[in-house]
Image (cartoon, rainbow, N blue to C red):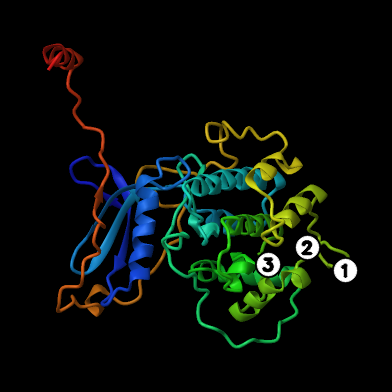
Amino acid sequence: MVRKKDTGVIYAMKVMKKRRGLQKRHIDRILAERDVMAFAGNPWIVELHYSFQDQKNLYLVMEFMQGGDLMGILIRHDLLSEEQTQFYIAEIALAIKSVHDMNYCHRDLKPDNVLLDKHGHIKLTDFGLAKGLGGSFSVGAKTKQQPEKKMSHLDKKSAWKKNGRQIFSMVGTPDYMAPEICNRMGGYKQNCDWWSLGVMMYEMLCGYPPFYAGDTGTTIDKVKNWKQNFGFPDDPGGLTNVKISKTSKDIIKKLLVGPDKRMTFTQIQQHKFFEGVDWDNIRNNDAIIIPEIKGELDTGNFDEFTSKGSKNDDPEPDETLEDVIGYTFQRIEPTPEVEPDFFRDSVDEEDTGS
């Protein structure tokens, strides 16, 4: 969290270390993240105000989303109600649609990339893997397949909550990836983001993602073979008190399918689960959970992180690292001091016909 000296405005600043020998795919990802936030111009994407660089780092200065993130909501609540789930899934769907309208797909949708403003409405962030500028998508190094541990509903929910940030912070978290991405299939479509939406909806109602297995390799394998591995905790034989409505199950099943059968945005809007949602005014109405905020510097909706090591452990580079060409950006901000109306009018009259 930073404050701009001349205006006093509070922003969030993301600092990324430069690396020697940046490859084109790395630069593409850096510029993709900057471009989407700088030029989107819609209320569903975190707005970038400045980007700049120095010898050591790249900097993104963004609007401060003081409500925290959706991950925080999921960690603080045992489960979300259907009404709460309806609100968040509807807003995320609108946000995804806005990204698709820009001819991108996000590809890394997960709860900690869904931020909340001070009123409790959502915006998407972290576009470093946006399709079209991000190069090939990597799910990380191959891991040795482990026999899946049999876990009850309560065991899964407890383990998922306990791991919390560690799981969520992975880049390209496999729990939320569509099978066509896990299978490294080329030419996949924007609708891989709708799969991620279905995973998040499942998690809101059940307490953990549908293919959670306790280790990355097994999770990837379960996603790849989703037809054999998908189910709800209250299916016949499941030992749980969680009850999920037929309507909720229906939409989740229509999102967690192969890309050719996956729901479109229009079909999502028209589904019975969203009956009563005012899609055109959802952002103008009160959010389902309004964050408690005590002042402009309140960070109570974020986890407290402790930094390992110190700045002295990371010495300044002994050579100038290459600049990322075209990285610098400055949003045109409103002028703090507005000229009196009578002065502007007189200037307009004098300039008439010039």
Q: Quadrant of residue 6?
A: top left
Q: Which residue is mark 2?
A: 232
Mark 1 or 3, which is nearer the eye? 1
Of residues 237 and 22, which is closer to you in this image?
Answer: 22
Left or right: 54 with respect to 132? left
Per the rendering, the mark at residue 237 is 1
Kind of residue at disc 1: Gly
Left or right: 337 with respect to 163? left
The answer to whether residue 63 shows anywhere in this view is no
Residue 147: x %, y % from top left: 70, 86
Q: Are marks 2 and 3 in contact (CB under 8 Å)?
A: no
Q: Which residue is mark 3?
A: 157
Residue 5: x %, y % from top left: 19, 46
Q: Distance of mark 1 from mark 3, alpha carbons? A: 18 Å
Disc 2 element: loop
Of residues 265 and 153, which is closer to you in this image?
Answer: 265
Q: Residues within 10 Å of mark 2 (few under 14, many from 20)?
A: some
Q: Distance of mark 1 from mark 2, alpha carbons? A: 10 Å
Kind of residue at disc 3: Lys
Q: Residue at image x 67%, y 41%?
A: 269
Sooner in the amino-acid sequence: mark 1 or mark 3: 3
